[in-house]
Amino acid sequence: MNPIRKKKLETSILRELAQLIIRQQNKDDRIEFVTVQAIELRKDFSSAKVHLSFFGTEDSKHQCYKAILANLNYFQSTIGRNLRLRYTPRLTLCIVENLDILNDNENINKLNDLQNLHDNKKQKL
């Protein structure tokens, strides 16, 4: 699939999910101090891995995770409706403990993209 379309869809889902969590925060007291770090879409757009980080005590992190997990189907259907997607990716949660790991993966992806661009330019010459 087109990597530009994939990146746009990932950022749109990230933005929409963050807004939904903020709105749900007002309704559910268990949701607090959560950050949506990144979205990883599969190549066929059938599922998306949501990277979340939680702040606070272990008990509050666990309660917040359970609240988001309970509302996951609502988030998925609302994202599909708001973004007008024909097929909404199935959301799966992934807890990020170490933020450096996520940044390293992004840097590796950027380096791979630069390498691919460089290879494509060589082939054209």
Image: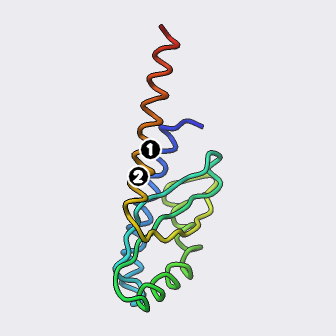
Residue at x 41%, y 52% (from the top left corner): 104
Instruction: Tell me the number on the disc at residue 104.
Output: 2
What's under tag 2, amino acid-wise? Asp
C-alpha distance separating marks 2 and 1 = 6 Å
> Which residue lies under the disc numbered 1?
108
Q: Secondary structure at mark 2?
A: helix
**CB of mark 2 within 8 Å of CB of mark 1?**
yes
- Position of the N terminus, as image quadrant, is top right
Colour setting: rainbow
Is residue 47 shown left or right of residue 30?
right
Residue at x 36%, y 74% (from the top left corner): 22
Examine the image and state in which quarter residue 101 appears.
bottom left
Examine the image and state in which quarter residue 55 appears.
bottom left
Residue at x 64%, y 54% (from the top left corner): 87
| Mark 1 Cα-neighbour bin, 10 Å: few <14, some 14–19, many ≥20 | few
Q: Secondary structure at mark 1?
A: helix
